[in-house]
Image (cartoon, rainbow, N blue to C red):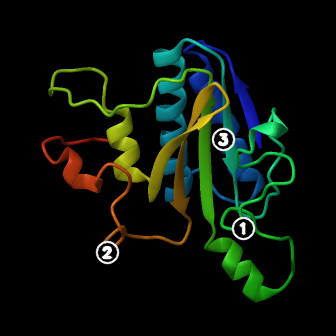
Amino acid sequence: MQLEIRPDPAEVGRARRWARSRLTGLGIGADEPLAETLVLLVSELVTNAVVHTGRPAVLRLYLPGSAPEPASDPASGAPGAAGATDPATTAPATTDPAASDRAAAATVRLEVADTSSRAPVPRCVGGDATGGRGLALVDCLADRWGWHAEGSGKSIWCELDRCSQSREGAPPAYGGGLSAYEDFAFEAV
């Protein structure tokens, strides 16, 4: 599933509402930790695209039990391109209980693609700064994240494992995990 984003700060709220509606459509309640975390990650990545590039972007969401839609440029070879699927993010529709358990434990993937070729750079900001913590939050909340070139721009992605209750013992995410931001405290409101 994908949503085109205009370079307008109001698009962040629209992207959150869109993501919530997609989760609800799959039976994932808005108050579930997965939904709350995913909506926060949507907010951070879409905000980064809107604020730091000033260009249109595309929000892509790969949910368990949903087939990925083709990307707008099938020749890009990016995940979601025509004919491309990622078995970790796509679960077949079935009534097999074991398959349903696998779908419940599947990975949710979020991507925001834009036309800026500038790499995302986590910033170190002081306690009084009102911004600059977006990628640090992504690093702390996502099970994995990263970015790759896509056409003349880039795609920043993150993944949440639906079954993970705790990140203890999990390999650190891109950027070294929590230790990369040990001097900062975050409060999600």
The reply to whether residue 29 is in sight is yes
Q: Residue 129: which disc? A: none
Residue 79 percent across, percent down from the top left: 71, 49
Quarter of the view holding residue 14:
top right
- Type of amino acid at the residue the image marks with label 1: Pro
At horizontal 59% and vertical 12% (from top left) the residue drawn is 8
Q: Earlier in the sequence, mark 3 or mark 1?
A: 3
Mark 2 Cα shell of 10 Å, populated few (<14), some (14-19), many (≥20) = few
- Type of amino acid at the residue the image marks with label 3: Ala
Q: Nearer the viewer, mark 2 or mark 1?
A: 1
Element at label 2: loop
Separation (CA) of disc 3 from disc 2: 29 Å
At horizontal 86% and vertical 53% (from top left) the residue drawn is 83
Residue 46 percent across, percent down from the top left: 55, 29
Quarter of the view holding residue 75:
top right
Mark 3 Cα shell of 10 Å, populated few (<14), some (14-19), many (≥20) = many
Q: Name the quadrant of the N terminus.
A: top right
Residue 9 percent across, percent down from the top left: 54, 15
Quarter of the view holding residue 73:
top right
Residue receiving disc 1: 87
Element at label 1: loop
Q: Residue 19: which disc? A: 3
Q: Residue 169: which disc? A: 2
Q: How many marks?
A: 3
Q: Name the quadrant of the C terminus.
A: top left
Element at label 3: helix
Q: Between 96 and 154, which is closer to the camera in this rendering?
A: 154
Separation (CA) of disc 2 from disc 1: 24 Å
Question: Up-down: is 107 above or below 189?
Answer: below
Residue 116 percent across, percent down from the top left: 55, 20
